[in-house]
Image (tube, rainbow, N blue to C red):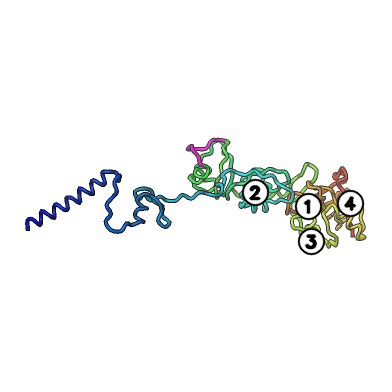
Amino acid sequence: MRINRYITHAIVLVIAIAISGYAASGRSASPVHFGTTNAQAAVIDVGGSSGDVMFGRYSTIIKPVDIPISAPKSHLPVTYVVAPGDTLASIASRFGVSTSQIRWSNSRLYSDPTIVPGLQITIPPTPGVVVTVKSGQTLESLASAYQVDPETISDYNRLRVSEPSAGMILVIPDGVGPAFPAPPPLIWIGGTFKITIGAPVGTYPATGFPYGWCTWYVATRRPIPWRGNAIDWYGNAAAMGYPEGMQPRVGAIMVTTESPIGLGHVAYVENVFADGSWLVSEMHYVGWGITDQRLIKPGQLTGGALIGFIYG
């Protein structure tokens, strides 16, 4: 019995010495294989892959790194030049923001949303507001003014300072600015014409004329059987036999060359006064989609601006 125990201990000791010698040799010698070789285990031991998992040496799991195929989105505001035919709504839709966010980001549009071709405006790179920091403003005050958390401003703009400095341009994601003022009921343009915001819209269908333009508005005040841009109306009406002249009459259509893009302008004559002045109603003189009434005195439309009046 005691001899068998010695023999067992000896065998265990020989096996232990063999294993430790193999480990110490840095695997320079060929290992002793017990049973069939496990190929997958060998791959894991020296590096490779098993299914969707990548292994380094000694079974270290390597996680594949996704390489972006598109450029990261810029956090900088966009400067956009208004093109003919642009509206605040079309620009906002193109850049994925709202018209209010564009107005809050441009001080000149805060009180008056009118845009004209060639005007440079600032567009937020994400729904929110672009602000230029004023002296004394802090992250806390800006966050309070635009209803966001200070961390939102700091994180989005990647600020490396505790407080922004005056003149710094910041983007405030999801910022909400103050309420816009109501348009003034009475304004002056160039010190020449007296303008009252708002004018009645008629009931005639303006078929064939796009909303927001002067031609659409006049077509709601009286039937218009011809087509074309405003500057073409005088000739088109004459070709259809409509009487025309250079004196204003109630219900006549005033045709002028007034247009920043050369398309002319039309307005509806509401009244004629004893001093020779006349009152017109119109759209898109102050701004796209805005109606107004304008008092015009003799001689104010100079340089051939007045083409004439369409009667009938």
**Residue at the front extreme, as displayed:** 30
Q: Where are the magenta residues, as a range?
A: 158-166
Instruction: Give the foreground label among 2 and 4.
Output: 4
Tag on residue 273?
none
Q: Which mark is residue 293?
A: 1
The span from disc 1 to disc 4 (Cα, nearest Å) is 18 Å
Q: Give yes or no for residue 248 being in the magenta stretch.
A: no
Q: Earlier in the sequence, mark 3 or mark 1?
A: 3
Check disc 2: other Cα within 10 Å, few if <14, some if 14-19, many if 20+: few
List the residue tagged with mark 4. Answer: 308
Taking depth in this image into account, of 130 and 147 the one nearest to the observer is: 130
Q: Which residue is mark 3?
A: 208
Q: Which mark is residue 181?
A: 2
Q: Amino acid at mark 4?
A: Gly
Spot the residue most to the left. Answer: 2
Residue type highlighted by circle 1: Gln
Disc 3 residue type (three-letter) = Gly
Q: CA distance from mark 4 to mark 3?
A: 23 Å
